[in-house]
Image (cartoon, grey):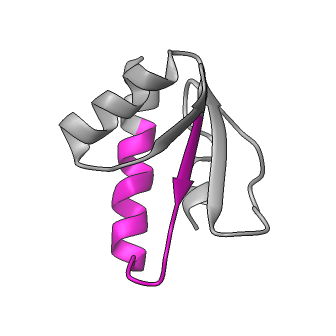
Amino acid sequence: MLAQGIAHATGLRLDSIEPPTNMVYFDTQAPAWKFKELLAEKHRVLCGTTASHRIRMVTHLDIDDEDIERAAEAVCAVGSRL
C-alpha cells in the first residue's frame, strides 16, 4: 500500500510498486539526509537512509491503513518540495 501510494511521486524513483516484504526502497533527487530530515520535521514520518540518495521505509503490524496513507502523502509532499 505504501509503495503504491508513492509510485508516482515527483522526485522519486521507486524500486518496486509491489515489494516482496514490508520494506519500501526508493531513490530521491535530493540528498537522502535532507529528505529524511524534512519528512520527520514537517510530517513526523520516520524513514532511514541507505545511501546518499536512497531511502528505506518499513511498515509493521502496528501501522494501520490510515498511517500508511498519511506517510505516503508526506513522502509525496516532500518529494515535490525538493
Quadrant assignment for the N terminus: bottom right
Q: Up-down: is 18 above or below 41?
A: below
Instruction: Estimate the x, y position of residue 14 in percent, counting from the top left.
Output: 70, 41
Q: Up-down: is 76 above or below 82?
A: below
Q: Residue at x 34, y 68 (%)?
A: 67
Report the span colored magenta: 55-76
Is residue 80 among what the camera can see?
A: no
Quadrant assignment for the C terminus: top left
In the image, 31 versus 74, the foreground residue is 31
Q: Residue at x 79, y 68 (%)?
A: 20
Q: Residue at x 78, y 51 (%)?
A: 16
In the image, 47 versus 39, the foreground residue is 47
Instruction: Estimate the x, y position of residue 21 in percent, counting from the top left.
Output: 72, 69
Residue 62 drawn in magenta: yes
Q: Is residue 74 left or right of residue 21?
A: left
Instruction: Estimate the x, y position of residue 39 in percent, counting from the top left.
Output: 32, 37
Is residue 5 among what the camera can see?
A: yes
**Identity of the residue furthest to the front in this view:** 50
Q: Residue at x 38, y 82 (%)?
A: 62
Q: Is residue 37 left or right of residue 13?
A: left
The number of discs equals 0
Instruction: Estimate the x, y position of residue 6 in percent, counting from the top left.
Output: 56, 48
Residue 60 drawn in magenta: yes
Q: Is residue 23 left or right of residue 10?
A: right
Q: Up-down: is 57 above or below 28?
A: below
**Identity of the residue furthest to the bottom in this view:** 61
Q: Is residue 23 left or right of residue 58?
A: right
